[in-house]
Image (cartoon, rainbow, N blue to C red):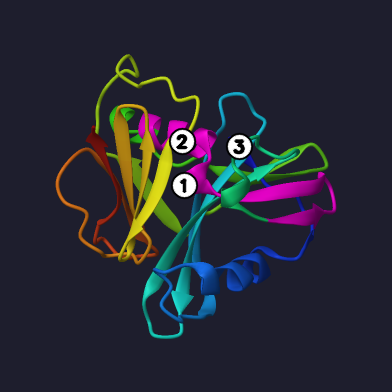
Amino acid sequence: MGIVHRATLSPSKQEIVEAWLPSRPWAEDRTIAGKVAEYRFDDPDGEVGVETILWRADDGSVLQTPLTYRAAPLAGAESHLITTTAHSVLGERWVYDGCGDPVWARTLVAAILTGARQSPMFFEEDGHRIDIPPRMEVRGSGRGDGADVPEIARVDSVTDDGAVTTARVGTVDLAVARVVGTPLGEGPHLDGTVGASDERIVLAVLRRS
């Protein structure tokens, strides 16, 4: 379950991504016009925040940025560190490009292969749960029981090819559409709908290496 703290971040998530985009080849000089939606998956160990945010760019395209939030640096992932931010409840957080974080990879692979949906998000206030209506719905294409979900201890490589980023994790490749709507080919996948639209858009595809 995705508990959301009533907190401030300095810098904010949008500021973090805006400062990072110019270094990304798939951004192509785009700038953020506003947030579209987000989806989260739960870290089974409850340690790492896993969130993917969709942003409307100034040219009308929608950019997809998987992010992870950690309480300490991730060893060996220096090239995937975006920045640190001060969280008013949780303290200093290390923010990573999710494509380089094994916890992101593990949660995405599990969602794709088991047909899972995103984690519901909610606030806690005076001992009561207040659900946050989702701005998008995602689900995996699989229907497995999790027995075929591989163990993922590290991300072996991350490569960009046009508007697609591919993370290699053991015997699995995860192709992510950085510009939503970019064709990713066939295979087990994560797709989603945004807002009131019924159109399902493929966001990521899993390929066996």
- How many labels were placed on the picture? 3
Which residue is drawn at the image coordinates 67% and 31% (left, top)? 47
Most extreme residue toward the left, as rendered?
A: 186
Residue 138 shows up from this direction: yes
Task: State how far apart marks 1 and 2 are (Cα).
Answer: 8 Å
Which residue type carries mark 2? Val
Disc sitting over residue 203 in the figure:
none
Disc sitting over residue 155 in the figure:
2
* Residue designated by label 3: 76
Magenta stretch: give its range.
83-110
Which residue is drawn at the image coordinates 62% and 24% (left, top)? 45
Which residue type carries mark 3? Gly
* Residue designated by label 1: 99
Query: Are the residues tagged 1 and 2 within 8 Å (C-beta)?
Result: yes
- Which corner quadrant holds the C terminus? top left
Whichever of labels 3 and 1 marks the residue nearer the N terminus, that label is: 3
| Residue toward you, 21 or 144 | 21
Judged left or right of residue 53, residue 89 is right
Q: Can you tell which of label 2 and label 3 is closer to the viewer?
A: 3
